Image (spheres, coloured by chain):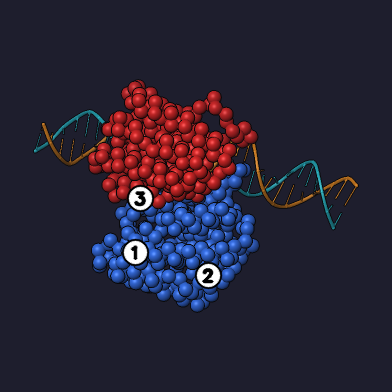
Chain colours: A blue, B red, C orange, D cyan
Amino acid sequence: MALKKAMIMTAFAAPDKSSLDNNPSRPAAVHEEVYQRLRRAIISGQLEPGRALSVRGLAAEFGVSAMPAREAIRQLAAQGALEITPTRRVAVARMTQEKLDELCDARLALEPSLAGRAVKAPPAAREALAATLTEIDDALDQAIERGDSADYAKYNSEFHFALYEAAGAPVYLGLVESLWLQTGPFMRVVIGRLGTSSLDDDKHKEVVAALRAGDAEKLEAAVREDIMQGMSNIVRGYSPDV
Amino acid sequence: MALKKAMIMTAFAAPDKSSLDNNPSRPAAVHEEVYQRLRRAIISGQLEPGRALSVRGLAAEFGVSAMPAREAIRQLAAQGALEITPTRRVAVARMTQEKLDELCDARLALEPSLAGRAVKAPPAAREALAATLTEIDDALDQAIERGDSADYAKYNSEFHFALYEAAGAPVYLGLVESLWLQTGPFMRVVIGRLGTSSLDDDKHKEVVAALRAGDAEKLEAAVREDIMQGMSNIVRGYSPDV
DNA sequence: GCCGTCAGAATGTGATCACGTTTAATCCGG
DNA sequence: CCGGATTAAACGTGATCACATTCTGACGGC
């Protein structure tokens, strides 16, 4: 029981305080931090589908009162990450075959064109982004070699969102975040089932190359292939109900 | 001031109780009803962009305590309908040119293919849907003749969502709802500015025809054209800041 | 007439409590 | 050893309160 508690604590790890907190002016709202930590944990697949969450439980985990936990839960439920059962209980959203198909279609419809917008950034910013992406991708490759599926999921999401955030398209970004919040938990299950060995041929190198070349079409194609490859892995590792 | 109060009351009108409440088993949560009414008001453009909302104000409007109002606000903010200012105040999201471009792109990327799924429904359900759509479209035409831009926006949203809900694609539907929550308020401003006279050539008839024919491609094309036409109207009526 | 000041009203946020429901555990009879 | 009933714990939800911050508008000096 103490072990499980420790696992939970790491899943909801606080953001790295050593990095610069780029908003020194205003202290962040408590419910906002709860939301962000929970969101990261879900996107990077640290919470398995069907995992029950409770207002009081979350509040205790984060050392806050019930109110911020409630707000974070409602926000994530609105984005499709959490399900509210008919009896009003809260759990990480489960996956179905139909939902998986929809998520795949929607990701292909949105993410490539979102990524494509990143090439419109000024060359200096583009180069900086490429450097950041390479850095993340290196960490990702190391995670694969290590067989660390948790870090893989983490760096994979960081890679994509570093690219997407650079596109400067907040509406698109919000939609895509919702999609990742719905795929994240299930993705992790699949990776844990298949292992990281089958993931060493992602298209991230092509993404960076196309970004450096300023070739929007190639960038979109690379992202599209990356998504399709990742989703086909999911299908390979799929089993119902979970 | 009493007049303004009355206007607000109509904007947040309660759903028609005479219609069947299709879930007699469990009483809906209070915050859920607040959310639904607010959501409808926003999608159908009854709240102008920049309109300030407050927890206590909303709670008073709906005759509830602050808590359900807070939850509804947070949910809608998570969907992009409401903005939270740097000082943590809440207002209906404003429009910018960049956001408008994004919304247009995203709608074109999602809504046609969502609508296209509706043709996969069994013929009987498709025919019933076509009948419903025709009914809504008639009311819509009458609203146009009347020059009633409020009813126009209402029936237009009802037309689209009747179609989209029939597609049976909840993930897509959630994304599209988010887009409408962001376009709704601004749409209404534009319609009010242009009048309804410029809106009598929508593609709804083609939509219904394609649905009846079971022609997914034509259906998608008709929806695409309807979106483009509606969005071009917005561009025509656009002026910054609002 | 304009702008800065300042007091009062309004607001977001977090905490806590109460109530009815739901889930989990316990116990008991077979 | 098992299954159903009963009791206890946990939960979601709504209400209310306190506090710090922010907005509003009136007032007064320039």
The amino acid type found where label 3 is placed reads: Asp
The amino acid type found where label 1 is placed reads: Glu
The quarter of the picture where the C terminus of chain B appears is top left
Is B111 drawn above or below residue B18 in the view shown? below
Numbered circle sitting on residue B53: none
Q: Chain of mark 2?
A: A
Q: Chain of mark 1?
A: A
Q: Chain of mark 3?
A: B
- CA gap between label 2 and label 1 equals 31 Å
According to the picture, the residue beneath numbered tag 3 turns out to be B105
Is B158 drawn above or below residue A130 in the view shown? above
Return the residue nearer the eye: D11 or B22.
B22
Query: For residue B199, which quarter of the picture?
Result: top left
Which of pointers 3 and 2 indicates the residue nearer the eye? 3
Residue A167's x, y, as percent? Answer: 33, 59
Return the residue nearer the eye: B54 or B215.
B215
Numbered circle sitting on residue A217: 1
Residue B39's x, y, as percent? Answer: 44, 37
Q: Residue at x 33, y 52 (%)?
A: A26
Q: Earlier in the sequence, mark 2 or mark 1?
A: 2
Crowdedness near tag 3: few (<14), some (14–19) or many (≥20) residues, C-alpha within 10 Å: some
Same chain letter for marks 2 and 1: yes
Residue at disc 3, secondary structure = helix
According to the picture, the residue beneath numbered tag 2 turns out to be A149
